[in-house]
Amino acid sequence: MLALQDVAYAWPGAPADCLRIEQLHIAAGRTVFLHGPSGCGKSTLLGLMAGVLVARQGSVALLGQDWAKLPGGRRDGRRVDHVGVIFQQFNLLPYLTVLDNVLLPTRFSRTRAGRCAGGAQAAAQALLDRVALPPALWARRADALSVGQQQRVAAARALIGAPELVIADEPTSALDAARRDDFMALLMDACAAAGSTLVFVSHDERLAGRFHERLSLPELNRAAVAA
């Protein structure tokens, strides 16, 4: 699913690389827990995996295609076709309804829309059912929801159209223990049902046992070792 080889990345204007990863392979269908302290580069690595950022050197390949070999527009199209993202701050469009937020990826990707059995609308409703968001909320604006409800909408949006890769950037950081556990169960079940690979970033190592693999970014990052 993902293959990183001899990757180096430095933020513009920075005097040195913040990430250097010799090799990292993530197989299709696996769930991966990526952890490390705040500021160690977890979100930067996710940006490279999703093609939002492009490595200074080396290769970051999704499904065999190196992001750096695509122009910006094609990277955007490939991302929406193959990657679902759950952001730490959810990034819902506040003026859209719950249902319209979930449908957004299918508006931009024929690939994702085409994978929706029974149509995108039916798929969105089925996902909202799966994440336990009742129909009474589906026509409500996203900014009228609680934090926990917004998080479930964000998960449904990431999962619609069965993207091959789902990336979750500390999505449980704002939740109490009970809501965190409920959300994790929903996310893992939904990814398994879709056959999606999941890369989940968190500093909460209590969650690691739920995943196939556990990766420590400070151990992977040769830039940190060199520093």
Image: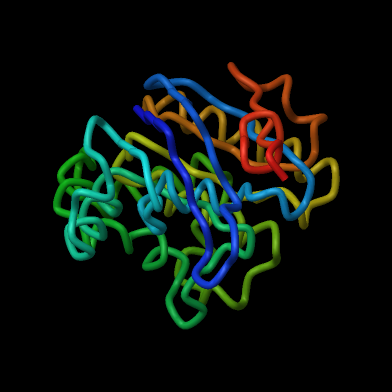
Please indicate whether residue 196 sits to the left or right of residue 215 in the image.
left
- What x and y, as percent, mark residue 53? 41, 57
Viewer-closest of 9 and 90: 9
Query: In the shown orientation, is residue 29 left or right of residue 15?
Result: left
What residue is at 20 percent from the left and 49 percent from the top?
A: 69
- Give whichever of 183, 224 is nearer the camera: 224
Question: Residue 186, how many percent across, how many down?
Answer: 59, 35
Residue 130 placed where, x, y %?
A: 50, 39
Which residue is nearer to you in this view: 166 or 220? 220
Image coordinates for residue 173, horizontal then vertical, percent: 76, 52
In percent of the image, x 26 and y 31: which residue is there?
63
Residue at 23 percent across and 64 percent down: it is 72
> How many badges with numbers are in the image?
0
Q: Residue furthest bottom?
A: 95
Protein image colouring: rainbow
Q: Quadrant of residue 177?
A: top right
Against 95, residue 42 (above or below) is above
The quarter of the image holding the N terminus is: top left
Depth check: 184 or 216 in front? Answer: 216
Residue at 43 percent across and 29 percent down: it is 197
* Vertical arrangement, residue 98 with respect to residue 68, above or below: below
Which part of the image, by quadrant, shows the C terminus?
top right
Task: Judge whether 136 appears above or below 143 on screen.
Answer: above
